[in-house]
Image: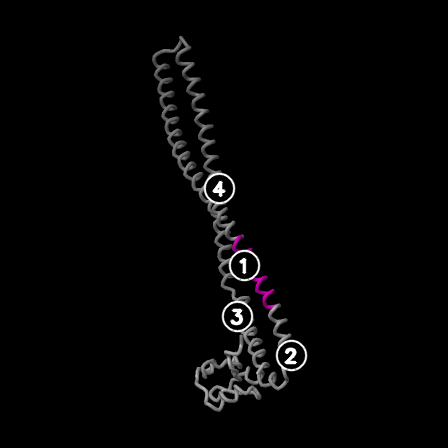
Amino acid sequence: MTDLKKLWEMQQLELKAQQLQKQLKNDTVVKELLQEKKNIENEKQQFKNLEQKYTLLKRKIKEIEDITEGINNKIHSLNDKLYNNSENGNKEIIALQNKINTLKQETLKHEDDELQLMEEQEQLKEELQAMSTDLKDRIKEFLKRREEYYTSQDDIKNQLLEMQNNIEQKFNVLEQEIINKYKQLKKRYQDPVAKVEKGVCTGCRMELTFVSQKKLKREQELVECENCGRLIFIGKEVG
């Protein structure tokens, strides 16, 4: 029957619409996006912590440079006393030399400390550069994926709207008897209408009796599958 073919087409649209609804409600991508956003925020915090550590190291290096400069000024002053004061006796000369040597040792220690801090600073700088690049890439990928998700959701909504309009149009031209039967069977099956191919109901995969097949060929009445109760029609006659 022509109406059954239209009803089957409407049913196919409904089944597709159900699949699209599932896609629309599927929150897997949302969860993944939220997790990635959280990961990015964590990495941003790690980056900020490294920046603070880098700034602290820079400050410490500057402090050591200032201390070293002060010591070198003292050494210069003591050297001036040592070599430009003719009144110095042996005792004064030895004392000045000892002070200069002590200050030079301090300078060497501060320079070693500064060198170590500078190495740490350089390592941190490399880590910051690598992390900065990684963050930019992750944020770019996150924004791209989020945009794709929004676009996909909009596309699904548009498809659903179009399908709903098509379903309504097909539904409005069907006979009330068929509509009532369809709604009744819908309580049992997602697909109350099934094609018959080579004498077999595609709904339950059972072969039909000769009597049912004969009724189908006449197309004069609604025919139900003797096995599952679905409304059936000859599938090969559908284009």
Per the rendered image, the range of residues in magenta is 144-160
Badge 3 marks a residue whose secondary structure is helix
Are the residues tagged 1 and 4 within 8 Å (C-beta)?
no
- Most foreground residue, 157 or 215: 215
Residue most toward the bottom?
211
The mark lying in front, picked from 2 and 3, is 2
Badge 1 marks a residue whose secondary structure is helix
Q: Which residue is mark 1?
A: 149
The mark lying in front, picked from 3 and 4, is 3
Q: Which residue is mark 4?
A: 51
With 143 as the anchor, is 199 left or right in this view? Answer: left
Q: Amino acid at mark 2?
A: Val
Q: Is residue 34 above or below residue 15?
A: above
**Where is the N terminus found, in terms of image quarters?**
bottom right
CA–CA distance in space, label 3 to label 4: 49 Å
**Overall secondary structure of the magenta section:** helix
CA–CA distance in space, label 2 to label 3: 25 Å
Q: Earlier in the sequence, mark 1 or mark 3?
A: 3
CA–CA distance in space, label 1 to label 3: 17 Å
- Most foreground residue, 97 or 200: 200
- Most foreground residue, 136 or 115: 136
**What number is the disc on residue 19?**
3
The mark lying in front, picked from 1 and 3, is 3
The mark lying in front, picked from 1 and 4, is 1
Q: Is residue 15 above or below residue 129?
A: below
CA–CA distance in space, label 1 to label 2: 37 Å
Q: Amino acid at mark 4?
A: Glu
Task: Classify 10 Å Cα crowding around label 1: few (below 14), some (14-19), many (20 and above).
Answer: some
> In terms of image quadrants, where is residue 75?
top left
Q: Which residue is mark 2?
A: 173
